[in-house]
Image: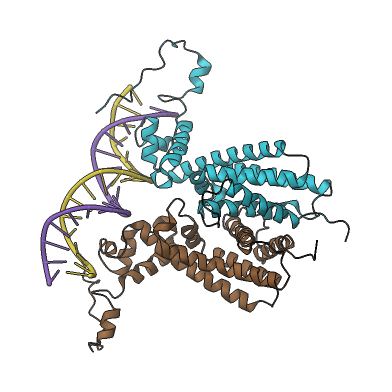
Chain colours: A brown, B cyan, C purple, D yellow
Amino acid sequence: VTDQNKRAPSAGVSVPDPAASQARAYHHGNLREALIQAGVDILAEAGAPGLTLREAARRAGVSHNAPYRHFADKEALLAAIAEEGFRELAHDLTLARDRAAHSAQAQLEETGWAYVHFALTHPQHLQIMFGRVFADRRHYPDLDEAASQAFEVLVGVIRAGQAAQEIIPGSPRQIAVGAWAMVQGLALLLIERQAPIAVGESNGEEALVRLCLRQSYEGMRWRGLA
Amino acid sequence: VTDQNKRAPSAGVSVPDPAASQARAYHHGNLREALIQAGVDILAEAGAPGLTLREAARRAGVSHNAPYRHFADKEALLAAIAEEGFRELAHDLTLARDRAAHSAQAQLEETGWAYVHFALTHPQHLQIMFGRVFADRRHYPDLDEAASQAFEVLVGVIRAGQAAQEIIPGSPRQIAVGAWAMVQGLALLLIERQAPIAVGESNGEEALVRLCLRQSYEGMRWRGLA
DNA sequence: ACCTGAACACCGTTCAAGT
DNA sequence: ACCTGAACACCGTTCAAGT
């Protein structure tokens, strides 16, 4: 009924560059990425209930049906959105690690807080990332790999700590599971506001998280030979 | 179209007991509880996507509209289902604590495993219990209280451990947050199959959980004065 | 009070076409 | 290849009634 969606291709740039025309798709120009971005935006604005295929298509300016050219079903779009989240998370964790002092404790505390900070600033995104219970991960290998990449940042920190004899010996992956579980659980409790934090307390969340992380570090600290 | 739903009131028991007729409601007899139970059943059978108000009403044998007499909207039913889950969880935690030996470490390990075991046997229920991000808890005081009751079991164990000088001093609630976060995170990782467990490994999950719990206990163990 | 049936707007998904 | 419009079955919610 309205013509608003029909835009002319960016005026003035009519040079038929073959490489560019290959990078850009038929009508829209990488509709897949546009749908993922629309999904992320919807999540931030309206939360998980507002995230529908039709709304994502609406924002991308295509018919409610076009998404099926890029995603088998809604699950597939959610998986792509989750994957995007894990890539951001891995990036944040890497930055935090590189910013921290050169000790295992400092790096674990900084990456731990970075994890919780990501969770607190993207709570709905986290819900998608970890809410895919029973959606078999093997059907989404790219998602699986992005999640692994984030996890591996933590494993790397622990491995280095073991090499420097700051962290107890043992499987670095097993130790990382414990650390990952701790921050994941903390993030959830804080999002749900189940953690006993005095309201209005400045930096209350960060202080609690760092306290828990330091305490948890005690459990993996190297204490010399038996 | 079918008469299957119209059942005669339990034949033979036609004594008009006033107390019973007050306990039972109009047509159905405690439709509220029936809807909650139907919701739990649907969750176990079909997961969160299958849990709809209309399906719950169908299983309870009432019109798709009757639930609105007992729940303001779908959120309210979900809150009631989550509340039911927290009551079960609190019960399981209490049993585990009473079953364990009389030491803080043993009680924390048993309640911790009980938590994860509940999560692994009711994964979809857990998703409802912890997936209500941004659904303001203050609107559901009963749910809030049920969740607190489960949490308090853990706080009690830690308080007793402090009294026996087995656990470091400090706010028992803060220490409990760390322990709760750990098991919550472990449960999520195991449900999502993100934890590196060899497939088919017997008791692999329980072994990993107990290892993490013992390690985390090291962080809160009392080690004598200064 | 408690329940029903019809109705509305919305959603995921499918299908037959259009270029 | 990529996109559209019509259609189907389903959902949450509302409303006017029925007993």
Q: Position of residue A177 (x, y in %)?
A: 60, 59
Residue B171 sits above or below residue A90 on the image: above
Residue A133 appears left or right of B119: left
Q: Is residue C18 left or right of residue D18?
A: left
x and y, in percent, of residue A165 in the image: 73, 70
**What residue lies at 53% left-to-right and 70% top-to-bottom?**
A90
The N terminus of chain A is located in which quarter? bottom left
Identify the image quadrant of residue A164.
Answer: bottom right
In the picture, measured across the screen, residue A81 lies left or right of residue A198, that is left
Q: Which of the 4 image quarters holds residue C17? A: bottom left
Q: Depth check: give the residue in front, B144 or B191.
A: B191
> Up-down: is A157 above or below A208?
below
Question: Given the current orientation, which residue lies at the most extreme right position?
Answer: B225
Measuring from the top left, give residue A74's x and y in whole percent.
35, 57
Examine the image and state in which quarter residue A26 appears. bottom left
Instruction: Looking at the picture, tell me which residue is in the foreground, B77 or A130.
Output: A130
Q: Do we see residue B192 in this rendering?
A: yes
Q: Is residue B102 above or below residue C2?
A: below
Q: Image point 38% across, 33% down: which residue?
A: B59
Q: How many marks?
A: 0
x and y, in percent, of residue B219 in the image? 74, 58
Visible residue check, residue A44: no
Residue sitting at x 53%, y 17%: B19
> Is the C terminus of chain A in the top left, top right, bottom left or bottom right quadrant?
bottom right
Residue shown at the point (26%, 67%) measured from the top left: A62
Vertical order, B10 against B158 (above or below): above
